[in-house]
Image: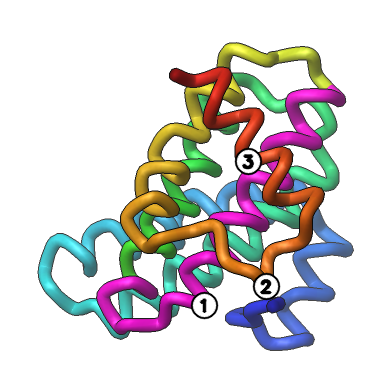
Amino acid sequence: MKLHFLCPHHRQWLADNPHHALNTWLQSHDKAAELFEDGDWNNALSHAGCALETAEIALEAWPDPPPRIINRYADNGVLLAQLLRERGDQAATRAVIANCIGRLERLMFATGNHRTVLKACEGLLRIGDATGWPESSLTDATHQSTHLLHQQLH
């Protein structure tokens, strides 16, 4: 399941200008968190989704991000998953968790920053556990990866 929050024009513009993606990501994430705290979940969902899509673009252009960026990415995934879970969309919640953990796994192997990445996965795994995952729609590879990450964390 691929969720789209950015319009094609903005997605392409950010891909062509990845140096702008980091600021856009951080601003969208902060706005989503603020809206979430205010109880405006629909607008928070839009901002959190845009932030996560923008984060993907930023991380593609940043092969070795510092730990604070890795943690921020995971926090963004947790926020989006929480918002989707509150809407009752378990399939989308699980998809976000699986996609985020998959992205973090690729970062872990690319950067060798195992401790930071494994720690960043904790919040995602907690939400996954609360939604009753893994689900059969997850691939075996994703299930195995998340299971291994979960075992390494505990």
C-alpha distance separating marks 2 and 1? 9 Å
C-alpha distance separating marks 3 and 2? 14 Å
Magenta-span inclusion, residue 85: yes
Residue 114, horizontal then vertical, whole percent:
67, 15
Rendered residue at 41%/82% (across/down): 89
From this view, report whether residue 114 is shown above or below residue 85: above
Q: Residue at label 1?
A: 91
Of 28 and 107, nearer the camera is: 107
Q: Residues within 10 Å of mark 3 (few under 14, many from 20)?
A: many
Residue 104, horizontal then vertical, whole percent:
68, 37
The secondary structure type at the circle numbered 2 is: loop
User: Label 2 sits on what residue type?
Assistant: Ser
State which region is magenta. 84-110
From this view, report whether residue 154 is shown above or below residue 48: above
Rendered residue at 65%/29% (across/down): 148
Q: Residue at label 2?
A: 137
